[in-house]
Image (cartoon, rainbow, N blue to C red):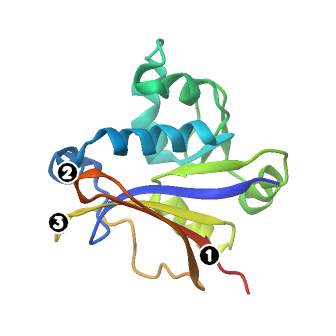
């Protein structure tokens, strides 16, 4: 049985805004952060995206053919599931659109053999999957900056029953990786 794992890069105040990455993400680049991101992607069996994240990532990664950054090969070959009621075509290799019976389809995917299905970013998708109690683990890559504005990963109304901290990892430049397991008791 596979776990459904959220992987999100955020600031201390929860901003994950791709349009502002030059301000909050880029200044904290380091070899340890690159290794963390690469190792996380390489460890998953499959990827899951909301439509917006898929449409942002697919054109870039699908154009890479030489395993750039050590992950392009994995991103291009791994099964990808796009949760969307509006997306009509998913042309990135091994992509499947799930638009109906979402809870049942994700439950079925989780029951397949393997280790994990990783959700990259996709805050709107994460919020709906939280409500359906489908997420097993959260991995936040927290950057030591407060933006004060920008798109927040945590939307009003997002609520978990409780999370258990299972691992922390201090990376260079003050970046912290936090691993939380969903408490279901």
Nearer to us: label 3 or label 1: 3
Q: Which of 127 and 135 is in front in this view?
A: 135
Nearer to us: label 1 or label 2: 2
Q: Do the residues labelled 3 and 1 touch (CB within 8 Å)?
A: no
Q: Nearer the viewer, residue 104 or 16?
A: 16
Of callouts 1 and 2, the N-terminal one: 2
Q: Describe residue 103's horizontal placement relative to residue 20 as left or right.
A: right
Residue beneath label 2, please? 20
Q: Nearer the viewer, residue 101 or 169?
A: 169
Q: In which quarter of the image is the C terminus?
A: bottom right
Residue beneath label 1, please? 131
Q: Which of 53 and 32 is in front in this view?
A: 32
Most distant residue in the top direction:
66
Q: Describe residue 34's horizontal placement relative to residue 2 as left or right.
A: left
Q: Residue at x 16, y 71 (%)?
A: 148
Q: Residue at x 84, y 45 (%)?
A: 113
Of callouts 3 and 1, the N-terminal one: 1
Distance of label 2 from label 3 (alpha carbons): 9 Å
Label 2: how many Cα within 10 Å (few below 14, some 14–19, many 20+): some
Residue 147: numbered disc: 3
Give the percent coordinates (x, y) of residue 48.
60, 46
Q: Quadrant of residue 44?
A: top right
């Amino acid at each position: 049985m596979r776990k459904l794992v959220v992987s999100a890069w955020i600031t201390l105040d929860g901003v994950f805004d791709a349009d502002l990455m030059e301000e909050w993400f880029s200044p904290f680049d380091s070899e340890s952060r690159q290794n963390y991101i690469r190792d996380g992607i390489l460890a998953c069996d499959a990827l899951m995206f909301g439509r917006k994240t898929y449409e942002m990532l697919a054109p870039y990664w699908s154009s890479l053919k030489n395993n750039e950054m050590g992950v392009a090969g994995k991103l291009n070959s791994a099964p990808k599931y796009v949760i969307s009621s509006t997306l009509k075509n998913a042309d990135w290799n091994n992509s499947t659109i799930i638009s109906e019976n979402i809870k049942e389809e994700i439950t079925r995917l989780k029951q397949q053999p393997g280790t994990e299905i990783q959700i990259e970013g996709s805050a709107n998708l994460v919020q709906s999957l939280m409500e359906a109690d489908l997420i097993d683990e959260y991995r936040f890559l927290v950057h030591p900056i407060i933006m004060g504005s920008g798109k927040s990963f945590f939307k009003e109304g997002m609520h978990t029953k409780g999370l258990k901290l299972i691992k922390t990892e201090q990376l260079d430049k003050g970046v912290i990786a936090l691993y939380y397991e969903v408490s279901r008791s």
